[in-house]
Image (tube, rainbow, N blue to C red):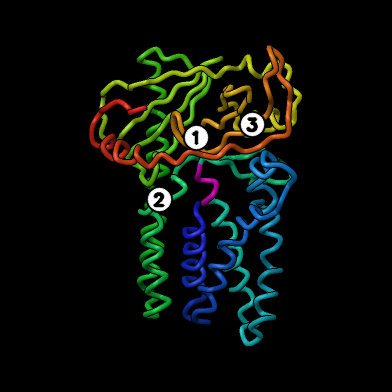
Amino acid sequence: MDSLTQLTFGAACGEAILGKKVGRKALIWGAILGTLPDLDVFIPLGSPVDDFVYHRGFSHSLFLLTALSPVFAWLITKVHRNTKPLFNKWMLLTFVVLIGSVLLDLFTIYGTQIFWPLDTTPHAVPTLFIIDPLFTLPILIGVSAALFLKNHRLNFIGLSLSLAYLIWALGVSVFVNGKMEEKLNEQGVPYSQFISSPAPFTTLLWRTVGIHHDQYFETYYSLFDGDAPLSVNSYPRNLSLMKGMDEHPPVAKLENFTRGYFAMSENNGSIAMTDLRMGSEPNYVFQFRVAELEGSKNIPTKPTRLQAIRDWSQLPWLWARIWSKQDNPE
C-alpha cells in the first residue's frame, strides 16, 4: 500500500492498543513501525531490476518481523522508561503493526516475500489497489480525531470500518475471479493463466490480464456488468525477442517475479521487458530495457528502467466504465 496508508494504519493500531495508557506515544510509534518495512526501497541492490524484484523481501518476512517485535518493544521502553511495566503491550503493538503492514502489502498485486528466507516466492492476493481512498480515509479520520481531539472512540470506529472494507474487498476478489473464469470459458477465450486486480482507487471495477502462449489479453469487469459479455483485447507478447537471453539474469529474474505476466517489445533497436500486472494497455508502470537488437541478434545489456508514462486522461473512462459497458480508448 502507499506510504500514507501504512503510516495511518500503524498509527491507528498503536492508538487502539495503547493510546489510552500512554497517549500520543502509541500513535507515533505505530506510525513509525507501520512505515518501517517499506524503507527497504532506499537500499540499493545493484541494478534497477534487483531493486524491483527484491523490494518487499527480507523486510517483509513474517518470521523476521515476529522475531524483531520484542527487540523493538525493548527499544521503545528504553526510550520511554516510565512505560517499562507495559512491555508486553508494547510488544503486542509492535507485532500487530509490523505484521499488519506486511499483510496490507500482500493484498496488492506487486508481490511480497512473506515467508523469506524459507520461501522467496513473491506472494500476492490482489484485493486492493495500492491507493484506495475508501480504505484509507476512515483510519485517517480516526487517527486525526485521536491526535487532535483525543477521541479514542472515533479511531476505533475508523479502524473497524477500514477492516470491514478489506473483508468486503476480499469477498469481491473471490467473486470476480470466479466470474472471470466463467465468462472467459463461455466466450471461448483461450488462456493458460489470468489474474484480476482492482482498477485504480476502487473495488467496483476490476482489470484482468491473461496469458496464452505468445499472446496476452486485457479486459475489465464491473460489479454492475451483470451478464454482459466481456470486451477482450489481445496483444502480442513478442517472445521471439527473448531468443538467446533465457540465461540473462535480468530477464530470468523478471520472468520469475512477474510469474509469467510479461511481454517483450522493441523500439529503436532496444528490447524492453514489461510487467503486465501493474498499469494498463499501453501504459505500464514497470518496464526495463534488457538488450539491444543488432541485425537479428539480441545483445544483452545492463538493465535500465524506462520512465513510466502517467496517462491520467484514462481516469474519467475508468470511472464511467464502472457504471456502463464501453470500450477502452487507446
Between 87 and 215, the one lying in front of the other is: 215
Q: Residue at x 63, y 39 (%)?
A: 122
Q: Which secondary structure dominates the residues rendered in magenta?
A: helix
Q: Residue type at mark 2: give it.
A: Asp
Between 316 and 172, the one lying in front of the other is: 316
| 202 to 157, vertically: above or below | above
- Residue 52 horizontal/vertical position (percent): 64, 42
Q: Which residue is mark 1?
A: 284
Q: Residue type at mark 1: give it.
A: Tyr
Residue at the left extreme? 324
- Residue 303 horizontal/vertical position (percent): 69, 35
| 277 to 135, vertically: above or below | above
What is the C-alpha distance between the residues marked 1 and 2?
Answer: 19 Å
Residue at the bottom extreme? 82
Between 294 and 4, the one lying in front of the other is: 294
| 152 to 64, vertically: above or below | below
Q: Which residue is mark 3?
A: 289
Whichever of labels 1 and 2 marks the residue nearer the N terminus, that label is: 2
Density class for disc 1 (Cα within 10 Å; few <14, some 14-19, many ≥20) is some
Residue 105 drawn in magenta: yes
**Corner quadrant of residue 232:** top left
Q: Which residue is mark 2?
A: 132
Taking the image as shown, residue 110 lies to the left or right of residue 117, namely left
Q: Residue type at mark 3: give it.
A: Arg
Residue 155 drawn in magenta: no
Taking the image as shown, residue 195 lies to the left or right of residue 264, namely left
Density class for disc 2 (Cα within 10 Å; few <14, some 14-19, many ≥20) is some
- Disc 1 or disc 2, which is closer to the eye? 1
**Corner quadrant of residue 319:** top left
- Give the residues in magenta: 104-108
- Residue 12 horizontal/vertical position (percent): 46, 67
Taking the image as shown, residue 122 lies to the left or right of residue 217, namely right
